Image (cartoon, grey):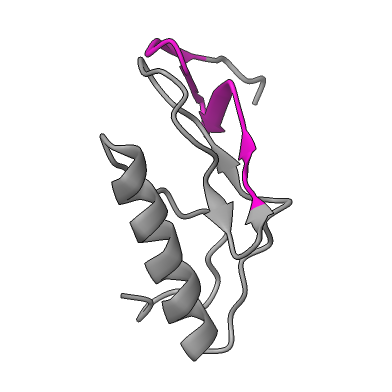
Amino acid sequence: MLKYLDFTDDIVLVSSKYAHIQNKTNRLVGNAGRVGLELNAHKCKVMRMNTRREGKVMIGREEAKDDKEFVLGTTVTKESGGTEYIMRNA
């Protein structure tokens, strides 16, 4: 699972159910710990799209912060489900 993460900054876990995303997060924390990596809960964010709030995603005993949008390159994805492209000056 963590075979090629020498220089990883961002990992995205996707799920349609709260219980599944918490399980994936727990497995990631466990697998990361086995190879000497640690997730920083203060830097982890949760974005829920087109869903009701169910529960907090926990990383160990700390809560991951909810976020309203996610920016990757020139794409902004919003919790309402919308995506837009942003232009950047070269």
* Residue shown at 58% from the left, 59% from the top: 59
Is 25 placed above or below 49 here? below
Residue extending farthest to the left is: 16
The image quadrant where one finds the C terminus is top right
* Residue shown at 73% from the left, 51% from the top: 42
* Residue shown at 41% from the left, 52% from the top: 22
Does the magenta segment cover residue 19? no
The image quadrant where one finds the N terminus is bottom left
70 left or right of 30 in image: right
Query: Which residue is more in the foreground, 67 or 75?
Result: 67
Q: Which residues are magenta?
A: 63-85
Residue 30 coordinates in the image, percent (x, y): 46, 77
Residue extending farthest to the right is: 42
Is 84 placed above or below 12 here? above
Q: Quadrant of residue 49?
A: top left
Majority secondary structure of the magenta segment?
Answer: strand
Is 64 placed above or below 87 here? below
Query: Which residue is more in the foreground, 54 or 78?
Result: 54
Residue 46 coordinates in the image, percent (x, y): 53, 37
